[in-house]
Image: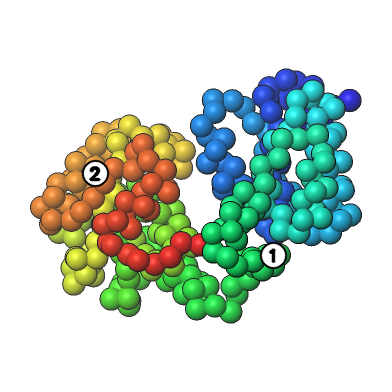
Amino acid sequence: MNSPDLTPHQLSAIDRTVFFVSDGTGITAETFGHAVLTQFDLRFRQIRMPFIDTVEKAHAAAQRINEAFKAEGKRPIIFSTLIKSELSKIIGLSNGMVMDLIQTFVKPLELELGVKSTHTVGRSHNIADSDEYKNRIEAINFSLAHDDGQSHKNLAMADVILVGVSRSGKTPTTLYLAMQYGIKAANDPLIPEDFERGKLPSGLLPYKAKIFGLSIAPDRLSEVRNERRPGSKYAAIENCRYEINEAEAMMRREGIRWMSSTAKSIEEIATMILQEIKSDKRAY
């Protein structure tokens, strides 16, 4: 018997199957699980099972876990954020190693705080009418409208303005800041015309205090650009070296805070930017 959706060859390439089980989206279980799994140099097959909010769905989820156990001969690992105890018990009876995040943290907090938790399913995501949610949507719209220097209108509203050469990581970083933290982040490319003038784009000058720069290693930049425009002057290593050198020189000259994105994840880049701009906006 093969594990569902896997060929024998694929099955032999994994060390363990991991399930993220939730009565909501499963994002919390998956985020926590990923943080833990990265500590192990193993190959994990990862499966998210969201919206497990009825007994029937819980039994179906447990059956799928049991099938993986029978096919692979190893207990699947389960990260669970199920709120209802009857659903947790069903998953707990499956042939898997269960990491129950709710029971691990909520129960001790109930004892410490002297208050029973609400045990409300999906409570953490029930924010559609909250000010925080509206601010986050507004930030996403702002970042999209101010992506790649397409508009300098209302830059006074920006929390941060990212600058750097094309493909240095500005767009994904601004969108991550908007989606996760409600940060209104604009971004503007530094292009050869800016280097010839030796000045920042004129539309940015009134907001220099909000500017944060991203740089990147020339070889990595060339690799990224070649994926977009193979064999072009835009992607040539000599051109990448020139643009990076000029951009970093301009940022130093203008007194702009900057960092290299070469060996950092979007999460790391965003965290460093938040520390620099000293934002106290909450994460979601």
Of the 4 image quadrants, the one containing the N terminus is top right
- Which of the 4 image quadrants contains residue 223? top left
* Residue appearing at x 19%, y 66% in the figure: 209
* Residue appearing at x 58%, y 79% in the figure: 129
Position of 105 with respect to 202 (left or right) is right
- Which of the 4 image quadrants contains residue 92? top right
The one of 167 and 13 positioned closer to us in this rendering: 13
Amino acid tagged 2: Glu
* Residue appearing at x 24%, y 61% in the figure: 211
Q: Which residue is mark 2?
A: 243
Looking at the picture, does residue 23 appear above or below residue 151?
above
**Residue 133 placement (x, y as % from top left):** 53, 73
Labelled pair 2, 1 in contact (Cβ < 8 Å): no
The one of 158 and 244 positioned closer to us in this rendering: 158
Number of numbered callouts drawn: 2
Position of 62 with respect to 81 (left or right) is right
Looking at the picture, does residue 236 appear above or below residue 249?
above
Position of 96 with respect to 258 (left or right) is right
The label number, if any, that marks residue 119 in the structure image: 1
- Neighbor class of circle 2 (other Cα within 10 Å; few <14, some 14-19, many 20+) is many
The mark nearer the N terminus, 2 or 1, is 1
The label number, if any, that marks residue 159 in the structure image: none
What distance separates the C-alpha of mark 2 from that of mark 1?
55 Å
**Residue 91 placement (x, y as % from top left):** 79, 45
Looking at the picture, does residue 133 appear above or below residue 23?
below
**Residue 15 placement (x, y as % from top left):** 67, 24
Residue 211 is at least partly visible in this image: yes
Residue 52 is at least partly visible in this image: no
- Which of the 4 image quadrants contains residue 8? top right
Looking at the rendered structure, the secondary structure element under dot 2 is helix
